[in-house]
Image (cartoon, grey):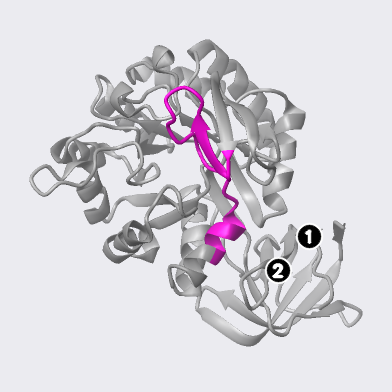
Amino acid sequence: MAGRADSTVLTGARVVRPGGTEENGRLAVEGTRIADGAREDARTIDLTGHWVVPGFVDMHNHGGGGASFTAGSVDQVLTGVRTHREHGTTTVVASTVTDSLDFLGRWAGVLSELAEQGDIAGIHFEGPFISPCRKGAHSEALLRDPDPAAVQALLTAARGTAKMVTLATELPGGLDSVRLLAEQGVIAAIGHTDASYEQTVEAIDAGATVATHLYNAMPALGHRTPGPIAALLEDERITVELINDGTHLHPAALEMAYHHAGAARVALITDAMDAAGFGDGAYQLGPLAVEVKDGVARLVEGGSIAGSTLTLDTAFRRAVTIDRIPVEDVVRSISVNPARLLGLYDRIGSLETGKDADLVVLDEAFVLKGVMRKGEWIVEPKGV
């Protein structure tokens, strides 16, 4: 069960630090922080045969545990947050889906309070400023062009807690909105887009820095019309989100992204919806009905993939055991890079003295065995 130990020392594990992996490592926690050393009366936990990695940071997540970040109540959001924490995500950004500006503004007010309390790390507005050609699981009737005044209205409603806005930057107002977001320190993410290669380059030059779930909801890579994928992979200014659930991406597509962008420019995300950590059944994603079958979420009408049921512990395990990505590179993608993008790397994202004691314990098969957040065990390791 959850519980805080004022002074704890983890010993014997492989500890992944910024400088590399420490064999037979030692990590001390004092209160809520990682410490240089521990008191003589510190509780010692022997984690021989395990890994200790930084807590996961999910910058694109719509819910979990049967609860939604896109509508509902504070209790629902907290249920989703708790579910993802139990799967190693110690920091989560709440993502919305397309709805009316009035509704999104009201809902941003709710989410902003949770961000101010530290329950979530901020808000990601995914929609309504996206292309009807690449709408995915968004209501076409509620889509609109990214008029800077409308974008500003959502930022204002979020009271400084907006972290990212996904835009189809080729639409009228798209480039001006990118510039507006960049000026205010909010991530402009290119996604749900039908942009050409040239239009994507223009958006990057205007200040866009993230590709929303690369490959998904954008034109496929072509040899004569390379489209946005080539532009996003080749530009050092762009971090590409990847959904590593085995459904959204073929392993070869994941490998290609790592090869061209490098681990320093990949952010592993869930794009999770309510069913993550919960199960199959009927759900809502914003105003749209979703059926989850065999762990895959699809719109009832049209059959488009509607987010994922992924948790980041599964994404981590797949990356190492199936995709054969080095553990240190996965840690960069799942903790370091998103923390940097969100402007939180001074507090989270790596196991360094003075930072929040956010960490995940994995066994030799990379199965989650423990989660600590700010010095408190969310999942306490058993039998170690």
Q: What's drawn in magenta, residue-wise? A: 293-317
Q: Residue furthest bottom?
A: 24
Where disc 2 sits, the SS reads strand
Q: Nearer the viewer, residue 298 or 197?
A: 298
Q: Residue at x 55, y 18 (%)?
A: 287
Q: Nearer the viewer, mark 2 or mark 1?
A: 1
Q: Say if 145 sits above or below 188 in the image.
A: above
Task: Tell me residue 103's x, y (percent).
Answer: 56, 14
**Label 1 CA crowd tier, 10 Å (few <14, some 14–19, many 20+):** many
Q: Nearer the viewer, residue 228 or 188?
A: 228
Asked if the magenta segment contains residue 379, the reply would be no
Q: How many marks?
A: 2
Of labels 2 and 1, earlier in sequence is 2
Q: Residue at x 35, y 20 (%)?
A: 148
**Label 2 CA crowd tier, 10 Å (few <14, some 14–19, many 20+):** many
- Quadrant in which the N terminus appears: bottom right
Task: Tell me residue 229's x, y (percent).
Answer: 25, 47
Residue located beneath label 2 in the image = 34
Q: Amino acid at mark 2?
A: Ile
Residue located beneath label 1 in the image = 379
Q: Residue at x 44, y 24 (%)?
A: 138
Residue 203, image quadrant: top left
